[in-house]
Image (cartoon, rainbow, N blue to C red):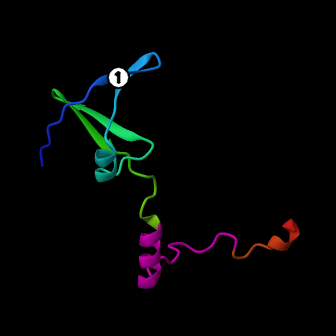
Amino acid sequence: MLLNMETSIISIGNSKGIRLSKTVIEKYNFQDKIELILENDYLILKPKPTPRMGWEKSFKEMNQNGDDLLLMPDVFEKDNLEEWN
């Protein structure tokens, strides 16, 4: 979907910026940070993905499927860890 809208460049301290409407911010799920991509003659704004987003769901699915087993034995299996107490 292509949307064409006009916005003004405003002063922000010693810099310049643009204001995005609440509707645009909510529609594209912009949070505290966004990605700015310069491509050909366009500026592209994208929501900045949250690191490890979706990992919790994936880990739960792995556990339910039995895919979260150790690939190698525990290295501390034979050690006496009580001396560290």
- Asked if residue 75 lies left or right of residue 4, the reply is right
Q: Total number of numbered labels? A: 1
Q: Is residue 45 magenta?
A: no
- Asked if residue 63 lies left or right of residue 30, the reply is right
Residue found farthest to the top: 14
Which residue corresponds to the image point at 35% horizontal and 22% vertical from the top-left? 10
Image coords of residue 56 (percent x, y): 47, 68
Which residue corresponds to the image point at 69% horizontal and 76% vertical from the top-left? 77
Which residue corresponds to the image point at 45% horizontal and 15% vertical from the top-left? 14
- Reading the image, the residue beneath label 1 is 10
Q: Amino acid at mark 1?
A: Ile
Image coords of residue 74 (percent x, y): 62, 73
Q: Residues within 10 Å of mark 1 (few under 14, many from 20)?
A: few
Image coords of residue 62 (percent x, y): 43, 77
Between 75 and 44, the one lying in front of the other is: 44
Image coords of residue 21 (percent x, y): 31, 41
The answer to which image quadrant residue 6 occupies is: top left
- Asked if residue 8 lies left or right of residue 85, the reply is left
User: Where 41 sits versus 65, above or below?
Assistant: above
Task: Check disc 1 and report its element: helix, strand or loop.
Answer: strand
Between 55 and 67, the one lying in front of the other is: 55
Residue found farthest to the left: 2
The answer to which image quadrant residue 79 occupies is: bottom right
Q: Quadrant of the C terminus?
A: bottom right
- Asked if residue 48 lies left or right of residue 82, the reply is left
Q: Is residue 71 magenta?
A: yes
Q: Which residues are magenta?
A: 56-76
